[in-house]
């Protein structure tokens, strides 16, 4: 049970009581320290990062971020997402506890990066730790954990419906003259930009056995070093006009790119096992960071609503009933969204990632779409400026919009939830037929004429 001082601490005050009660003293300490870090080191430095990108080049990680990463490491605020399976490297936080940290990190777009807790790094680190052999771990995982380099995940393709990964067509073949060498040919979209000076390796999913009768065994995951000859970045993809430098989103061409077969992760044909294990916690992290980002947009709306220098018809924006309603609706939605994601995190803690599938999908479906709607309302309260660089709102909205698609579109999650729900129709029908049988008995007992019901159920 938290002390009333802790329960009302700005880092913890929005955390629901049922979650506060489950936080260990260590987690409470981390949450407060992450809050202090983001509020004092990150948010006030946002304009400096923009200025450094302009000064040193858009694909160089700004010196301020390098400095903060070194400092966070020294202060024990690095790799906070690592689950307990990482032993002494892990801070030992549960999914529920880490989710509270992730929300705070989300208040500044790049704050998670200063703590090595950003996407796609977190998912990639978990993947490499879970599926690589010892040699691969030393070579590829340790530099990521130490924050010396960064990685990208490359699955999506321009010519395939990539939300159905069985369609991935980029080809991996063995060199007939040297079976220890793999040759890669194909096109890929997204995966952080090769131009970024810190990036060193791509985790690539490609097709190695197209004629395998089992479509789940046709694909292989490999490690592709960024400097592999034949592997080129054609351009950076902008997202709603933003280049998202210095990480970016590349468009790639593989033309007879050659890598050692020793770079295969887990084994040939096992890419789906790997992809399945990767995304659960990452989706929750994205959703919590998005809630943090949306809380900040909401705070800006509160400031705007009470700004004495902006009074249409002589009244504060927040004096109009429609805006009072709008503020209330935003507050209620934000608190409800947080409950949904924390429930998913807790379900994963108690029952595991697989059992948490529905709760994870629920977060992924509800949070990005609702966050985009809330940020849109915040923009509206700012008038024209809300759509310009005078506020961070357009970038925040873009973040919410892209999380609806990244890591799988929400429509695909709805499709899965709907299909799973339809499978429950059998037992539901049986229960309702039971009502009907009992109804007939009662009709007989009370001598009431039994009426036909639609579909044979009550
Ligand atoms: C900012 C950003 C970053 C990204 N980062 C990465 C990355 O690092 N690595 C990477 O590999 N990819 C990345 N992606 C790609 C992303 O994962 C894919 O765009 C996504 O999986 C959808 O695949 P697709 O674009 O091929 O769309 P498609 O598969 O063609 O789907 C198009 C649309 O069809 C509908 N649809 C699809 N499936 C279903 C279904 N089952 N039921 C109902 N409707 C459906 C949806 O509306 C969907 O949006 C990123 C995307 C964005 C926007």
Image (spheres, rainbow, N blue to C red):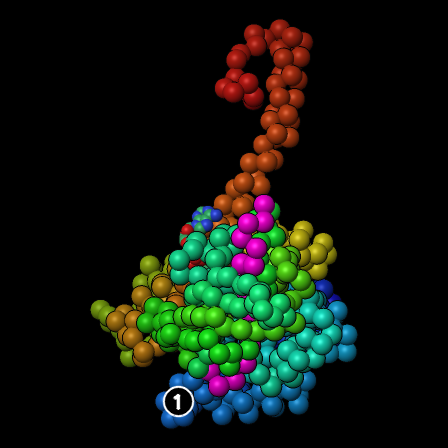
Q: Residues within 10 Å of mark 1 (few under 14, many from 20)?
A: few
Q: Residue furthest front?
A: 177
Q: Quadrant of the N terminus?
A: bottom right
x, y percent for residue 171: 50, 61
Q: Quadrant of the C terminus?
A: top right
Question: Magenta includes 249?
Answer: no
Q: Which residue is mark 1?
A: 57
Q: For the magenta stretch, what is the residue range?
A: 196-213
Whether residue 167 is visible to the viewer of this picture, yes or no, is yes
Q: Is residue 193 left or right of residue 41?
A: left
Whether residue 374 is visible to the viewer of this picture, yes or no, is no
x, y percent for residue 235: 37, 75
The residue that appears at 56% across and 7% down in the rendered structure is 449
The residue that appears at 35% across and 77% down in the rendered structure is 391
Question: Magenta includes 210?
Answer: yes
User: Where ligand 1 lies, by image quadrant?
Assistant: bottom left
The residue that appears at 41% across and 92% down in the rendered structure is 56
């Amino acid at each position: 049970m938290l002390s009333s001082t802790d329960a009302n601490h700005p880092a913890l005050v929005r955390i629901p009581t049922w979650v506060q009660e489950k936080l260990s003293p260590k987690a409470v300490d981390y949450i407060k320290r992450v809050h202090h870090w983001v509020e004092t080191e990150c948010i006030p430095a946002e304009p400096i990062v923009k200025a450094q990108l302009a000064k040193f080049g858009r694909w160089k990680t700004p010196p301020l971020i390098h400095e903060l990463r070194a400092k966070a490491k020294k202060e024990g605020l690095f790799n906070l997402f690592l689950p307990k399976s990482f032993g002494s490297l892990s801070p030992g936080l549960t999914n529920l506890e880490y989710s509270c940290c992730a929300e705070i990190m989300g208040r500044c777009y790049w704050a998670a990066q200063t703590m090595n807790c950003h996407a796609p790094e977190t998912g990639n680190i978990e993947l490499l730790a879970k599926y690589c052999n010892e040699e691969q771990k030393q070579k590829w995982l340790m530099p990521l954990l130490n924050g010396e380099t960064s990685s990208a995940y490359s699955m999506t393709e321009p010519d395939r419906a990539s939300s159905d990964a069985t369609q991935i067509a980029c080809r991996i073949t063995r060199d007939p003259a040297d079976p220890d060498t793999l040759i890669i040919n194909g096109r890929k979209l997204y995966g952080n930009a090769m131009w970024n000076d810190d990036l060193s390796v791509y985790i690539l999913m490609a097709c190695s056995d197209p004629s395998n009768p089992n479509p789940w065994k046709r694909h292989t995951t490999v490690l592709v070093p960024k400097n592999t000859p034949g592997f080129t970045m054609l351009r950076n993809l902008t997202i709603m006009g933003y280049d998202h430098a210095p990480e970016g989103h590349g468009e790639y061409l593989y033309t007879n790119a050659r890598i050692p077969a020793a770079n295969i992760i887990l084994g040939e044909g096992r890419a789906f096992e790997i992809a399945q294990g990767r995304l659960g916690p990452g989706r929750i992290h994205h959703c919590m960071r998005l809630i943090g980002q949306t809380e900040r947009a909401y705070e800006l709306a509160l400031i705007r609503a009470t700004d004495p220098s902006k009074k249409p018809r002589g009244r504060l924006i927040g004096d109009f009933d429609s805006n009072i309603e709008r503020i209330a609706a935003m507050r209620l939605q934000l608190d409800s969204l947080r409950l949904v994601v924390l429930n998913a995190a807790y379900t994963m803690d108690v029952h595991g990632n697989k059992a948490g599938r529905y709760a994870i999908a629920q977060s992924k479906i509800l949070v990005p779409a609702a966050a985009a709607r809330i940020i849109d309302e915040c923009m509206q309260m700012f008038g024209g400026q809300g759509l310009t660089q005078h506020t961070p709102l357009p970038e925040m909205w873009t973040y919410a919009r892209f999380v609806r698609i990244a890591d799988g579109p929400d429509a695909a999650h709805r499709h899965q939830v709907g299909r799973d729900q339809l499978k429950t129709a059998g037992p539901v029908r049986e229960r309702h037929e039971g009502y009907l049988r009992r109804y007939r008995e009662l009709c007989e007992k009370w001598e009431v004429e039994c009426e036909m019901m639609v579909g044979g159920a009550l």
